[in-house]
Amino acid sequence: MPLPDWLSQTQDLPSLQANVGFLIRDRFYYGPDHPADPTDLERLTVPLSAPRIPAASASVITVTEALGRERELADYYRQIVRLAREHGRPFNSIRHCFWLRLWLWNADRQTSVSFPWYDSYSEIDRVLKPLVETDEGELLYDVDQGWDMKIHAHDGAVHFLESDPDDDDAAQLAIRVPREPLVQQVRTLRESAQAVIARLTEELGADVWTSYVRTEPVFKP
């Protein structure tokens, strides 16, 4: 099978760091999903206490930071569950409070690969699993609103092409990185992420991180 033409566009990048983040919010909104008054989005809120975990960002706790501190992260989520109960909010109105994000980045080069539509671990693992298991060929092709991602392994490197399919003039990200160091990171990351999610599930009584939740979860009292 011929190689994709876009592989010739990619530029060398020495490495990528990989992590999965739990998105952290500082306020809980308990009002209607479609408020009649826009000011309700500010008025009908209560503050949330941040997880007691040393973190580089106030809005994200990474798997690396959470590993071994799962109870502190679970305490943060327990606040959300308690407030949802108090205000009669169904899980569908708070599911965004449990979203995850995958980050691949190189801080020195200020370069990152984004996955804005992947909110659960099962979606994220669509990237991580083939990165580990496939050493040659297509790893991922996905497209969503304003986002197009192609990932391909070839000749000891992983190639990424990120673009906006709705804007021909938008800048593309076209990079290639050595595969083996990335694979070693991702292998450890997958194990750690699954371990943290398993512990959070044990603490709260329901798994709302692994995949899209279609029925109302039953959390511990």
Image: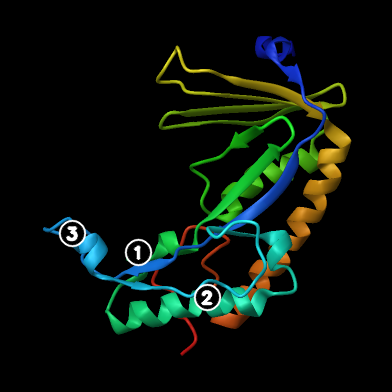
Q: Tag 3, which secondary structure?
A: loop
The amino acid on which the numbered mark 3 sits, given as a three-letter code, is Thr
In 3D space, how far apart are the residues under numbered discs 3 and 1 (Cα atoms)?
22 Å
Q: Is residue 58 visible?
A: yes
Numbered label attached to residue 217 = none
**Image side of residue 126 versus residue 68, left or right:** left
Q: Is residue 44 left or right of residue 196?
A: left
User: Quick check: 130 left or right of 203?
Assistant: right
- Number of marks drawn: 3
Q: Residue under label 2, please give it.
A: 76
Label 3: few (<14), some (14–19) or many (≥20) C-alpha neighbours in 10 Å: few
> Mark 2 falls on what kind of element?
helix
Residue at the limit of the structure toward the left, as seen here:
36
Instruction: Looking at the image, tell me whether mark 3 or mark 1 is earlier in sequence order.
Output: 3
- Residue 39: image tag: 3
95 w.r.t. 216: above or below: above
For image coordinates 64% across by 44% down, the residue present is: 103
Type of residue at label 2?
A: Tyr
Secondary element at image label 1: helix
CA gap, disc 1 to disc 2?
18 Å
The CA span between labels 3 and 2 is: 26 Å
Above or below residue 89? Residue 6 is above
Task: First in sequence, mark 1 or 2: give its number.
Answer: 2
Question: Which residue occupies 17% across, 55% down?
Answer: 38
Q: Is residue 181 above or below residue 100?
A: above
Indicate which label's residue lies in the foreground, 3 or 1: 3
Q: Are marks 3 and 2 in contact (CB under 8 Å)?
A: no
- Residue pictured at 51% horizontal, 62% vertical: 24
Tell me which numbered mark, 3 or 2, is placed earlier along the sequence. Answer: 3
Tell me residue 189's x, y (percent). Answer: 76, 54
Q: Which residue is mark 1?
A: 92
